[in-house]
Structures are given as C-alpha cells and as structure tokens.
C-alpha cells in the first residue's frame, strides 16, 4: 500500500520488535500474531508497519501530551480490593445498552476513529478498513461507533456487515458541520441505513494542537477520501485546515435539541468531563453520556477520564442515562476499574487501530479478545460473578489506601 514503508523503522522500534519476537520464540510461539500477548505488543508491531505521519496521527495527543500520559497512568492510582470465596465458576459480562436497545457480550466497545484506511494492511480496496473493524466487532458481539470522518461511507460500512451479522450493533458518530442541511442529511441517512444511535462529539470546536503530526506534515493520503462529509482535500491543505473549514464551532445545547427533533434515534453526547455538563445532557434529553477527553487529542491539561468519571456518575446515576467512558484503557483491569466506578461500558480507540494495522479484521478481533479475556480474569480474581455486581467497594485509591 502506498502509504506504508519499511524504511522509517527506527533502530529502537526494530529492537523492540526483535525482543517481542525473541520473547515469543523463547516461549515456543509458532508465529508472530501468536506472541502478541497484550495491547502494548500490538502497538509496538503496528508502529513498525505504519508510515511515520500516520503513526503520529494515530498515536499522539495535544500540546505537551500531559493528559495523554495521565489517561493511562491514572489507572495505576486505583487499586483493586478483591473478595474471596465467591463462586466465580460462571462469569457474566453481558451488558445491556440504552435500556435494552442492544446487548453486547462484554462491556468493551469500539470508539469512533477517523481515517482507518491508513491502517488497512490488505492493499487496494480502500473501503476495507472500517468494514473489517465492523465485522470484527460484530463477530465478537460488541458495538462499533463509526466516525463521520471514516474512509468508507457509512452505508458501505453497515450494509456488508449486516449481511453476515443481521443484528450487528453500530452507532454513528456525528460531527455537526456548518452546513446544517448536510448535518441533517447525515443523521437521516444513518437512521435509514440502520445505525442504532447518534453519538455527537462535543469536545471538538476546533482540532487540538497535535505537534508531532504537524512536524510529520500529516495529511490524508491521496488514495483515501472522507465520503460521509463529501470532503475532498486540496493540495497543501492540512487536515486541521479541513476540519476548521467544515466543523461548526457555534455548536451549543440548542443544537442538541434540534438534533433530537430531526431523528428518532437516541442521542449520545461524547466528550463530557464535568458533572454540570452531564446534568445538562440529561436535561436536554440525551440517552447516554460518554466521559471522554478525545484520547487527549483536544485540550491538553484536562483531567484523565478515569479521574473525571466518579463525580459525573454521582451527578447523574439515578437519571436513567447510560454512562460510558474512554481514554487510555489498555488492560482488562482498567475496564474493571471503570465499570466498578459506575460506567456501563468502555470504548477503546488506539488499541483497535493497532490490531487493524497488524492483522486487519483478525487483528481487531484479537485485540478485542485479549481485552475481553483480561477483563473476565480480573472479574474472576476479584470475586465478581456478574458485571451488575461491580461497585466501588472493589476499588482503593492507591496513594491513600482509602476506599473510593
Ligand atoms: C486516530 C484517532 C482518530 C479519532 N477520531 C475520532 C473521530 O472521528 N470522532 C470522535 O468523536 N473521536 C475520535 N477519536 C477519539 C476516540 O473516539 C476516543 O475518544 C479516544 O481516542 C479514546 O482513547 P484511546 O485512544 O486511548 O482508547 C479519535 C481518536 C484517535 C486515536
Ligand atoms: C479532516 C479530518 C479531521 C478528522 C478529525 C478526527 C478526530 O476526531 C481526531 O481526533 O483526529
């Protein structure tokens, strides 16, 4: 594929890959995918396969990337407090979403991720990437949120996957664009072709300052396009230019009411970091909230999402809305901490891109499978039989050893 090159491997990337291979061959692993034991293993290999600009676009955060680090590090400040002598011979991770509208096998969903085409390892069919991710989600019985900036149109993602998996659960992530007619058309199209909810992203009035991708002159490769928004990138235009030319920074709560008036689909707001905004989301009729800092790609220096979660849960837990969270989730124990803290489910983005880069649909399935297995094991070893029984008694604030 045009946008891939083996030349950009740094010696430290190569060393890491060699060590990963070495480690696995010491364990007698037969070939590469077998020895990718965790999300970080997938990340290391994906880094060697992507072009440098694409890697930096996917991996990095805004400004000094303080929040990017916090998103993962904050999980370490929370420790688990297991209970013993509980029958954990059957672990139940099935999760209902949006008052039973969907049931997923385990509470880990795929977050909206723009431009997956750059992570597609199988050459020419540029519509393959998001389709592969959708198939992987469906075959694992979980849910994918498709980005407005997908490199495959929303219809071309959902139609083929629904042939094999008629109940495949997909939501459409909406960027509200200046052209409200186009926004409305996107929403109506999503409803018509079978998406189960509209996830409106509210933390991107402009694109964050992501210096590594600016240094790498990142832009969408010529062989890819953004068909949902009918955006054709012009020569010399950065993706940040494209974003500012289409996205509407005047977006406000009245638009959420307007969105509700143009569709029957549930509206989910993505990008909530304060309890005040969570309460407003409930007042404006949203069906769910995604606690998110956009993978630390927008405003640096905001709270990590696991730290923002408890006060939001406390503010709206009795209001009948689902609360989901994303950001820095890389281990099953991270998932468990989120669910015990009060989230109904989590979403992951970068781990999915690493899986897709390494092995297409299979890679995404493996990544989801790894997280699922780790989550089940964490539940089992914590003495939790059913996701419904997760609560804050299983958590400790590490530094103070105090209960949450
Ligand atoms: C490469 C990339 C593209 C993204 N594109 C979108 C997008 O189109 N819409 C959106 O709402 N969020 C987008 N996000 C944010 C994710 O949906 C999610 O909030 C965040 O990345 C989760 O953190 P994680 O990557 O640490 O799992 C993107 C994230 C990444 C890494
Ligand atoms: C012109 C394409 C901009 C896509 C922005 C997608 C996004 O949300 C991200 O975090 O990146």
Image: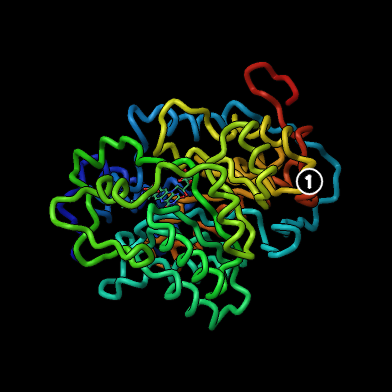
**Mark 1 element type:** loop
Query: Does residue 355 sit above or below 240 in this rendering?
Result: below
- Name the residue: 50% across, 53% down: 111
Indicate if the residue with disc 1 has its beta carbon within 8 Å of ligand 1: no
Residue 128 coordinates in the image, percent (x, y): 36, 72
* Residue 213 horizontal side relative to residue 72, left or right: left
Q: Quadrant of the C terminus?
A: top right
- Name the residue: 17% across, 57% down: 234
* Residue 264 horizontal side relative to residue 60, left or right: right
Residue 345 coordinates in the image, percent (x, y): 65, 50
Crowding around mark 1 (Cα neighbors within 10 Å: few <14, some 14 to 19, many 20+) is: many
The foreground one among 319 and 41 is 319
Residue 202 coordinates in the image, percent (x, y): 50, 44
Query: Does residue 388 sit above or below 393 in this rendering?
Result: below
The foreground one among 74 and 317 is 317
Residue 354 visible in the shown view = no
- Name the residue: 68% across, 30% down: 311
Residue at the disc numbered 1:
384
Residue 367 coordinates in the image, percent (x, y): 50, 57
Residue 292 visible in the shown view = yes
- The picture quadrant where one finds residue 194 is bottom right
Query: Does residue 306 sit above or below 343 in this rendering?
Result: above
Query: Does residue 17 sit above or below 77 in this rendering?
Result: below
Q: Residue reaching furthest bottom?
A: 163
- Name the residue: 21% across, 48% down: 238
Q: Quadrant of the N terminus?
A: bottom left
Instruction: Count the marks.
Output: 1
Snapshot colouring: rainbow
- The picture quadrant where one finds residue 235 is bottom left
């Amino acid at each position: 594929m045009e946008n891939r090159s083996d030349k950009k491997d740094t010696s430290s990337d190569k060393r890491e890959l060699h060590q990963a291979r070495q480690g696995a061959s010491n364990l007698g692993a037969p070939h590469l995918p077998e020895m990718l034991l965790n999300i970080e293993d997938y990340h290391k290999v994906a880094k060697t396969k992507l072009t440098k600009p694409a890697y930096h676009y996917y991996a990095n955060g805004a400004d000094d990337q303080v929040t990017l680090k916090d998103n993962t590090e904050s999980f370490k400040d929370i420790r688990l407090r297991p209970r013993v002598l509980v029958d954990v011979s059957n672990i139940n991770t099935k999760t209902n979403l949006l008052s039973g509208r969907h049931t997923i096998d385990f509470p880990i969903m795929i977050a909206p991720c723009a431009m997956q085409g750059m992570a597609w390892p199988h050459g020419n069919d540029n519509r393959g990437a998001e389709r592969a991710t959708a198939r992987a989600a469906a075959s694992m019985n979980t849910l994918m949120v498709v980005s407005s900036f997908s490199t495959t149109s929303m219809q071309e993602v959902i139609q083929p996957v629904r042939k094999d998996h008629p109940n495949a659960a997909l939501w459409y992530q909406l960027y509200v664009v200046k052209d409200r007619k186009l926004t409305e058309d996107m929403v109506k199209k999503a409803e018509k072709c079978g998406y189960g909810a509209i996830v409106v992203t509210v933390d991107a009035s402009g694109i964050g300052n992501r210096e590594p991708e600016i240094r790498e002159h990142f832009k969408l490769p010529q062989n890819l396009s953004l068909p949902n928004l009918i955006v054709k990138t012009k020569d010399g235009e950065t993706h940040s230019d494209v974003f500012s030319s289409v996205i509407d920074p005047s977006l406000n709560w009245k638009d959420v009411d307007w969105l509700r008036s143009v569709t029957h689909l549930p509206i989910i707001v993505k990008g909530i970091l304060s309890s005040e905004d969570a309460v407003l989301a409930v007042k404006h009729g949203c069906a769910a909230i995604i606690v998110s800092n956009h993978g630390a790609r927008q405003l640096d220096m905001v709270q990590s999402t696991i730290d923002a979660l408890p006060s939001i849960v406390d503010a709206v837990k009795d209001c009948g809305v689902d609360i989901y969270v994303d950001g820095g989730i890389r281990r099953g124990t991270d998932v468990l901490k989120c669910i015990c803290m009060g989230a109904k489910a989590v979403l992951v983005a970068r781990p999915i891109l690493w899986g897709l880069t390494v092995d297409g649909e299979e890679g995404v399935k493996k990544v989801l499978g790894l997280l699922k297995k780790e989550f089940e094991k964490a539940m089992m070893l914590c003495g939790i039989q059913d996701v419904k029984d997760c609560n804050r008694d299983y958590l400790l604030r590490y530094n103070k050893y105090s209960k949450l």
